[in-house]
């Protein structure tokens, strides 16, 4: 989704992110403006130098991040808007298998009997 809620140091700059706990809490609170958002000022992790990383910061998670990395912005490309369902890996693999089998049967007549 496109949002501006991760804004300290990056005001008026829309960015695409994957929905996370910070976004959900903000949305559940009625989408309040900066300064009135739930959890503002809450430290979600320290930076490697020990400085606090606060909820709504623009800093993306990093490999050695401690604590609540999921609450930081999870940046995504334009295709994130195409995600409508959350599926398990098993469901996705099953769909790929069914689609591939149908394509093989349709194009070369290959049929997999189970």
Image (cartoon, helix red, strand yellow):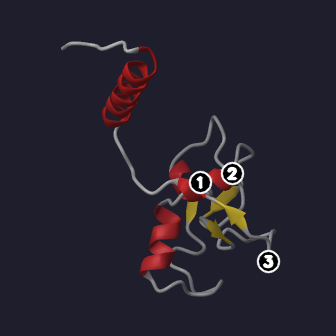
Point out the frontmost of discs 3 and 2.
2
Estimate how packed mark 2 is, as few (under 14), some (14 to 19) or many (20 or more) residues with alpha carbons within 10 Å: few
Residue at figure coordinates x 33%, y 28% from the top left? 98
Which residue position holds label 1?
80
Q: Are marks 1 and 3 in contact (CB under 8 Å)?
A: no
Which residue position holds label 2?
77
Q: Disc 1 versus disc 2: distance between alpha carbons?
A: 6 Å
Q: Disc 3 versus disc 2: distance between alpha carbons?
A: 18 Å
Q: Are marks 1 and 2 in contact (CB under 8 Å)?
A: yes
User: Against 34, is 99 above or below?
Assistant: above
Q: Nearer the viewer, residue 41 or 11?
A: 11
Residue at figure coordinates x 65%, y 67% from the top left? 2
Q: Nearer the viewer, residue 25 or 102?
A: 102
- Residue farthest left in this picture: 114
Which residue position holds label 3?
12
User: Against 85, is 28 above or below?
Assistant: below
Estimate how packed mark 1 is, as few (under 14), some (14 to 19) or many (20 or more) residues with alpha carbons within 10 Å: some
SS state under label 1: helix
Q: How many marks?
A: 3
Q: Nearer the viewer, residue 20 or 41?
A: 20
Estimate how packed mark 3 is, as few (under 14), some (14 to 19) or many (20 or more) residues with alpha carbons within 10 Å: few
Nearer-N-terminus badge (3/2) = 3
């Amino acid at each position: 989704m496109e949002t501006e809620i991760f804004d300290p140091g990056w005001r008026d700059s829309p960015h695409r992110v994957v929905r996370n706990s910070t976004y959900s809490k903000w949305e559940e609170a009625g989408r309040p403006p900066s300064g009135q958002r739930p959890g503002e000022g809450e430290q979600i992790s320290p930076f490697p130098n020990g400085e606090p990383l606060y909820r709504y910061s623009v800093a993306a998670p990093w490999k050695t991040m401690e604590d609540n990395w999921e609450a930081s912005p999870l940046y995504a490309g334009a295709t994130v808007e195409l995600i409508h369902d959350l599926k398990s890996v098993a469901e996705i693999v099953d769909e790929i298998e069914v689609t591939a089998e149908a394509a093989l049967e349709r194009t070369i007549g290959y049929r997999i009997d189970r």
